[in-house]
Image (cartoon, rainbow, N blue to C red):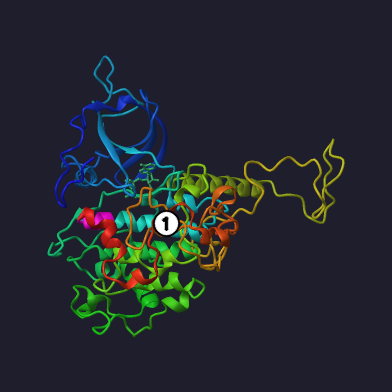
Amino acid sequence: MAVAAPGQLNLDESPSWGSRSVDCFEKLEQIGEGTYGQVYMAKETETNEIVALKKIRMDNEREGFPITAIREIKILKKLHHQNVIQLKEIVTSPGPERDEQGKPIEGNKYKGSIYMVFEYMDHDLTGLADRPGMRFTVPQIKCYMRQLLTGLHYCHVNQVLHRDIKGSNLLIDNEGNLKLADFGLARSFSSDHNGNLTNRVITLWYRPPELLLGSTRYGPAVDMWSVGCIFAELLNGKPILTGKNEPEQLSKIFELCGTPDELIWPGVTKMPWYNNFKPQRPMKRRVKESFKHFDQHALDLLEKMLTLDPSQRISAKDALDAEYFWTDPLPCDPKSLPKYEASHEFQTKKKRQQQRQAEEAAKRQKLQHPPPHSRLPPIQNPGQPHQIRPGQPMHNAPPVAAGPSHHYAKPRGPGGPNRYPQGGNQGGYNPNRGGQGGGYGSGPYPQQGRGPPPYPGGGMGGAGGPRGGGGSGYGVGGPNYQQGGPYGASGPGRGPNYNQGGSRNQQQYGNWQ
Ligand SMILES: Nc1ncnc2c1ncn2[C@@H]1O[C@H](COP(=O)(O)OP(=O)(O)OP(=O)(O)O)[C@@H](O)[C@H]1O
């Protein structure tokens, strides 16, 4: 489909939008619950295609069709990219079925509503990361980050700010593709940034300092701060800036990134809310110190993303050029990533809640029927030949219900276990730098000036690919690196080209602008 010029609607879409009924789909299960409506997995009855239906919540809308939905539809209609969720169509339901007296029938499958039909994605990043025992490998993190930045760069050159980058809005399918979703807060912007935009956007933990200081003139840098938070979260295993409210969020940012002054952020003292939130004492930047376990290239990139002054913060385009993506261990090919059972934040939260309820019920039961005093001899049940003592092996024990035998992590949260590699180089780091052999120039990614980011050669992924649990099994072959693989020849490689005019990205994205 043709891509509309920046700021324009794509008029090339199907004329039938909104003309089909939601009855063309069979609702399978709820997979999401957002501020603006529920999301269902559904099957198109005619084609059996699995899709996601996002119901547009109308109940609180005194003023008609919600503006967030209008924005989301308008923006998604003009964005067409492999790292941006595809809005396939809009469907409607005529309204509740009525009984003979004209009263709406309870439990009607779809009450009168409007649904957005999206391509279905198996996971969101938060849901995936929350899977018990989940550990992302370094090539996997690089692969997701690279796709996130590619999708975001596409949005930015098309003059769209996402304004709600967070894990649950990054959808991943079982082909390893990552796509930006939830454009409910997105906006078109003009490159002169003169707009008077709201600063009440972006989920608090991912919100940049300029918005917290009241800026209403901002640009793509706001999304890049959120990307920095996600990046650090992926490497760190848990969110890094977890304020409970806006002042606390800002003070957490200052504790990590230092207090801003006119020297490092010209104009900061003139920001609308600077005086309200002025730091009491100067603090030093501690990004390097706090994340010293990250590898050097990861840390360099993170520093550039978590730059306080938005005008100095790295862009998506330049981030894609960072050494991080071009040094071992290289980003893996999305297709080499393991396939996981579907996991969306909504479902993992629900499972955890059910687990908590079961634990509480068990606790209550224990209180009501306390076990006999430990000193008393155990009561022998009829038919139970021996009492099993701690440490004694349990023969004939029932199999442990559901789940693999490996270690299960506790639910996520501050203080919880890390779901991600501890050190940047952990797991499969291959010190052999090769001839940039891998890559997938013929794949869905646009070509870059110094060739696409190379992937480890044929040894990458495959049967022993990166599965959670320490990251062994990837970054395999020294020899494969050197051989170049199917893509090696197409890329000019780095070396001398790197600093010459015309960065990779100019070539890569030039045709979108
Ligand atoms: N195309 C899709 N495929 C699979 N799951 C999806 C899809 N779109 C959304 N979801 C799931 O539904 C959740 C909520 O979707 P979305 O963020 O679009 O709704 P929202 O109402 O805008 O939510 P929020 O309150 O987070 O802004 C997502 O986190 C994701 O788990």
Q: Give the residue number, with chain letter if any, for mark 1.
A: 489
Query: Which residue reaches farthest top?
Result: 100
Q: Is residue 138 magenta?
A: no
- Residue 445 percent across, percent down from the top left: 35, 51
Task: Tell me: is circle 1 under 8 Å from ligand 1.
Answer: no
Q: Nearer the viewer, residue 446 or 398?
A: 446
Residue 236, placed above or below residue 376: below
Q: Nearer the viewer, residue 449 or 241?
A: 449
Residue 340, placed above or below residue 221: above
Q: Residue at horizontal 29%, vertical 29%? A: 111
Q: How many marks?
A: 1
Residue 321, placed above or below residue 158: below
Is residue 361 in sight in this rendering? Answer: yes
Prevailing SS of the magenta stretch: helix
Q: Nearer the viewer, residue 167 or 75?
A: 75
Secondary element at tag 1: loop
- Residue 442 percent across, percent down from the top left: 38, 49
- Residue 355 percent across, percent down from the top left: 55, 46
Q: Residue at horizontal 18%, vertical 40%? A: 65
- Residue 290 percent across, percent down from the top left: 47, 75
Is residue 245 in sight in this rendering? Answer: no
The magenta-colored residue range is: 154-159
Give the left or right position of residue 371, taking residue 186 as reference. Answer: right
Q: Is residue 158 magenta?
A: yes
Type of amino acid under label 1: Ala
Give the left or right position of residue 235, taking residue 60 as reference. Answer: right
